[in-house]
Image (spheres, rainbow, N blue to C red):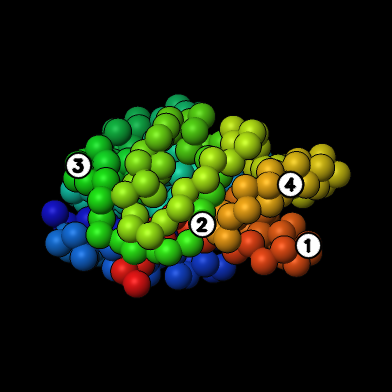
Amino acid sequence: MRVALFVACFDDALFPATGRAVTALLERLGHDVAYPPGQTCCGQVHWTTGYHREAAGLARAFTAAFDGAEAIVAPSASCAAAVRDAYPRIARAARDPALARAAEDLAVYELTEFLVDVLGVTDVGAYFPHRVTYHPSCQSARTLGVADRPLRLLRAVKGLDLVELPAADECCGFGGAFAMKNADVSVAMVADKVRHVRDTGADVVCAVDNGCLAHIGGALSRLRGGVRVMHLAEILAGTG
């Protein structure tokens, strides 16, 4: 299958290893990966902060960049959710039926959805000999409903010791602009999350959203506890 890689602007700027890991993983599974050069920000932050006209412009650019793609795969549940859930609302707000039709034609998948639901794969041939816990980001759990797909993939990784994260369904406090507009609340939330992560004794905490991992990782680094954060794609791309 020819897969169009959708790399969130946050990942592109701060976590470029994630996009490389997705490419390596999908190519190892026998698929062609293309990176449409016209892609920019999907417009999620503009839409959620009230800049609806700007969000519509970015949505039009996104649908044009990925027009005709057989499958669009994103290592960001948050951005995949924005395209699937917010684009129809953005089109309605902009009174743009052409945008609505273009958005409806997009086949956008978060990485674990694509692997498990489309490719029917849980064992991707990965090897990662570490103790790992998984944080389900709010967008992955609540908007996309990825459920146990990430856990099924992690359980199949050779050498990996998967440990359950206490209160896993609690938000880490990132929430994009939320962390800046409500800093005190955000810090209190991530303090709880970090305490639970450390209680697992894990070497690595992973997720399918780098925004959450940046937030959790920043808090962990201040405690000098030795726990690393990694995107799930980087674990699945590992072969030893």
Q: CA distance from mark 4 to mark 3?
A: 35 Å
Q: CA distance from mark 1 to mark 3?
A: 40 Å
Quarter of image, res 218: bottom right
Crowding at label 4, few (<14), some or many (≥20) Cα neighbours within 10 Å? Answer: few
Q: Nearer the viewer, residue 204 or 28?
A: 204
Looking at the rendered structure, which numbered label has been put on residue 131? 2
Q: CA distance from mark 4 to mark 2?
A: 16 Å
The residue at which mark 3 appears reads as: 120
Residue 151 placement, left or right of 50: left
Q: Are marks 2 and 1 in contact (CB under 8 Å)?
A: no
Type of the residue with mark 4: Arg
Residue 150 placement, left or right of 178: left
Instruction: Indicate the quadrant containing the N terminus: top left, top right, bottom left or bottom right.
Output: bottom left
Crowding at label 1, few (<14), some or many (≥20) Cα neighbours within 10 Å? Answer: few
Q: Position of residue 153 (x, y in %)?
A: 34, 47
Q: Secondary structure at mark 2?
A: strand
Q: Are marks 4 and 3 in contact (CB under 8 Å)?
A: no
Could you tell me if residue 117 is visible in this image?
yes
Q: Secondary structure at mark 1?
A: helix
Q: Which badge, 4 or 3, is on the more N-terminal residue?
A: 3
Q: Which badge, 1 or 3, is on the more N-terminal residue?
A: 3
The residue at which mark 4 appears reads as: 195
Q: CA distance from mark 1 to mark 4?
A: 10 Å
The residue at which mark 1 appears reads as: 223
Q: Position of residue 148 (x, y in %)?
A: 40, 35
Looking at the rendered structure, which numbered label has been put on residue 201? none
Crowding at label 2, few (<14), some or many (≥20) Cα neighbours within 10 Å? Answer: some
Which of labels 2 and 1 is toward the front? 2
